[in-house]
Image: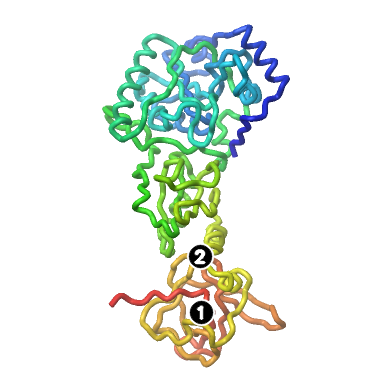
Amino acid sequence: MHQRSHSTLFSWLAIAILAGALAVFYFTKPMESAMAAEKNLPTNVETIVVGMGCFWGAEKRMAALNGVLETEVGYAGGNFADATYKKVLAAEHVPGVRNHAEVVKVVFDPAQTTLEHILAGFWENHDPTQGDRQGNDIGTNYRSAIYYNTDAQRSVAEASKTKFQKALTTAGHGAITTEIAPLAAFWSAEEYHQDYLVKNPRGYCGLGGTNVRYPGLAGGTTPTTLDLAPLNAEDLNTQQQLIVFEAEDCPYCVQFKNEVLSNWKSPIAIVRTRQNTPPGDWSLSQNLWATPTIVLFEQGKEVDRYTGYDGDSKRFWGWLGYHLLSDEERKIAFEQGTERPFTGSLLDNKKPGNYVDPITGVPLFRSDTKFNSGTGWPSFFEPYEGALTTHEDSSHGMTRVEVRSASSGIHLGHVFNDGPPPTGQRYCINSRVLRFVPDEE
């Protein structure tokens, strides 16, 4: 989690920053050729320093660009010396202090790529129209910025800004607020910030991008770009809607898509987006801070969210089930409860169709396997293959075999060996944890 505290100012840090501001001390990093020799890089490497908001995600995105040899996160653009993470946080809103931005120094090989390609990746991978913020990270230290080393780099940066502004305007976005200025100093960030998302793959990866492509470059720029159309509130379900907020470079977003969304049958509508805000006048109850975040909206307002995904699909379905099921249904599904016999609405249902999991929508039983057992609960002699899991149950002084849904993990009932042929089994299931989907006529 990328924690930010913009309101707390440490007085001793503020004094140090003000002293540094008065001194206006700057230093110059070694020339590219010396750095290249020291790190065994090609002798003709070029560097550019860019700010895109949180430098954790920015570094990973820029490092993925073709021709990039090395990246380093740090601080630049401010007017005080010896910038550190704590000093930058404390400098916000201090009178007379120009704060540093969180930046990435990008070292690239001009034989493999061009500065315009590097800057195309920069423009595509964040929203350069947001001023002193990036997504949910707010403050001048999150401003969009390009700090150049030469006049030639400045010309390329200005030209790329003009080109991307035209594309943004066509797509309905506002004016670019990116600061373009000469690099006076680069202060390397603390070691734990370097390659942060490589060391911490579950760490915060900022939301970003405008879904606008940088125009006119053959072969594209960013191979990890996820193209999702912006959401339109009129296309969503105002009664109940799930929105998955993703990031462009987020392996857990891909995992959630593959493990949960790829075979979505749940009755609730769900959409994905790379935007960091909901559409129209829909509203979040608090800022997003990790991806993927799955938010449940009702009447356009957030009612709950599921933050992050680490492969525990049962936990996700359990979260969703608490919103889709009634109190009595939750008691059966999550507390191994039992409805009173002869009270279930599906007991006498004889229509052709499928009995499905009420949360995931995955089919559990087919209507032609249902029979009248006389017990007072819907009974089936055979489930769909792989639809159920069985578990030993020694509750209430009995030894029984519990039946759960394989897709959501919820409790359904029990199975007994006194059923009809051909299986000889009786799956005794609670009506309230089934949904019936009739065959289409």
Q: Nearer the viewer, residue 25 or 328?
A: 328
- The colour scheme used to paint the residues is rainbow
Q: Earlier in the sequence, mark 1 or mark 2?
A: 2
Q: Which residue is mark 1?
A: 431
Residue 218: quarter of image: top left
* Residue 240, above or below 381: above
> How far apart are the two marked residues, 1 and 2, measured between alpha carbons?
15 Å
Amino acid type at mark 1: Ser
- What is the quadrant of the C terminus in the image? bottom left
| Mark sitting on residue 324 | 2
- What is the quadrant of the N terminus in the image? top right
Helix, strand or loop for disc 1: helix
Q: Nearer the viewer, residue 145 or 392?
A: 145
For disc 1, the neighbor class at 10 Å (few under 14, some 14 to 19, many from 20) is: many
Residue occupying the point 50% across, 88% down = 424
Q: Nearer the viewer, residue 343 or 208?
A: 343
Amino acid type at mark 2: Leu
